[in-house]
Image (tube, rainbow, N blue to C red):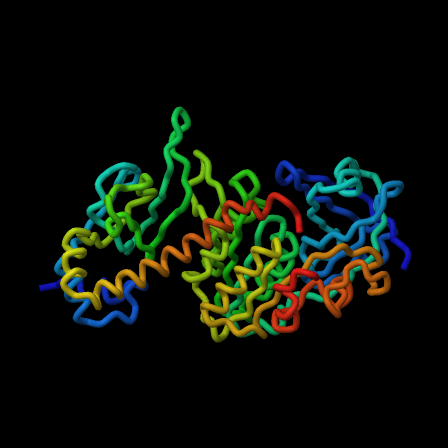
Amino acid sequence: MQTLEPYLAEHPFLKGIETRHIQLLVGCAGNVRFDAGQYIFREGDEANEFYFIRHGKLALEIFRPHKGGIVVQTLQPGDVVGWSWLFPPHFRLFDCRAIELTRAIALDGTCLRNKCEEDYQLGYEMMRRFAHLMEEELLALRLQVLDIYGVPG
Amino acid sequence: MTPVPFMVKKVQRDTADTFTIVLTDVERVTGMTFAPGQFNMLYVFGAGEIPVSISGDPTSTKKLIHTVRVVGTVSRALRRLRVGDFVGVRGPFGTAWPVQKGESNDVVLVAGGIGLAPIRPALYYLLANRKKYGKITLLYGARTPSDILYRTELEQWRARFDLEVEVTVDHGDDTWWGNVGVVPTLIPRAPFDPLNTIAMTCGPEVMMRFTVMALRKRGVNTDDIYVSMERNMKCAIGLCGHCQFGGKFVCKDGPVFRYDTVAHLFNKREV
């Protein structure tokens, strides 16, 4: 039977992770698809899942009253969506919308948290990778708020 | 070096603060040849002279094209010019993008804001000699969708099968369906072979710093990365010292530098 193991193993976020950890992840994984315009989650929702994007494009948005959502970041194949499953109280901080038909692997956060509690090495691997992702996204965000194209030079 | 009079043939608004001016050689003697990445000194009579990158096609000498951002007295005076007015031109000056070195390699061009203007001649050259190169990728970042330069041309380039174009904006709006995020974030998934790639980048210095970081992280060698620096150029021939960048003059030794020759200056706050 075809499992999600090869798809997870080739995802850039999990590059170099041990096979036994991939096998643990597969137990919490499911295949999902989102149509263009569909909201994957909204700010304030419970954060029970995160996603490895395989195909398509997603937008992270912040909602502004009377003005609608403003896109703060777009995500593509190879990206990971969702950190809130890691940190209590596990609520979403942004809206996430599919810009086009998107296919992803969803990981059940509760299932994975339990496995991380049982296997600290897996927990460390996941924390290390998410910390790196956060560092990269924080850097990009800092550049974004600098408004570097606003002033010449 | 005396400015040569060129006549304004066209002034076209690109964005709210950027315009492209097309000049022709009045004396119709030689036109002007230049290499991609070089700049001219444009003299608006009665207002002054400024350095402006040449943004046109290096294979065409009939017209001279510059894209200018309005930031001061001279650039404002340039924008006020009408068809038939005259501009004094000195140049071309400075070093060029290493388009020959890129032959048989992949080439990645990373531009931010008006930094696309000096990159465009390199892309024209690469496309005119397309068979000599591997994959060609243009990564472009702008502040907002309305700040995107050469929008029509970007759309045409995107439609080509032999060119990869990715555009991103720092701040999207309701009309924007493309990428949102800074331009260095496009580098990890851009389709080039890092060990056989020549990278050229132009934009605000902060953007170039992080672009170089992302290119190096991807595995591109520092001697295969080229940056176009911007300083206050006045004489354009390395005499006045206004554009000094460490031990180099941007007007004469640059504006295009191989990254490893200026890496030690890149993070030096005093220069």
Query: Which residue of the protein is positioned furthest toward the left in this rendering?
Result: A1
Q: Residue B66 or B10: which is nearer the viewer?
A: B66
Where does the N terminus of chain A fall, quadrant-wise?
Answer: bottom left
Residue beneath the point at 37% across and 33% down: A63
Percent x, y of residue B53: 71, 54
Residue beneath the point at 85% across and 61% down: B240
Percent x, y of residue B39: 74, 57
Q: Residue B82 or B50: which is nearer the viewer?
A: B50
- Marks counted in the figure total 0
Q: Residue B118 or B49: which is nearer the viewer?
A: B49
Residue A64 in the image: above or below residue A116: above
Percent x, y of residue B242: 80, 58
Q: Residue B30 or A9: which is nearer the viewer?
A: A9
Residue beneath the point at 38% across and 26% down: A65
Query: Which residue of the protein is positioned furthest toward the right in this rendering?
Result: B2
Residue B269 in the image: above or below residue B117: below
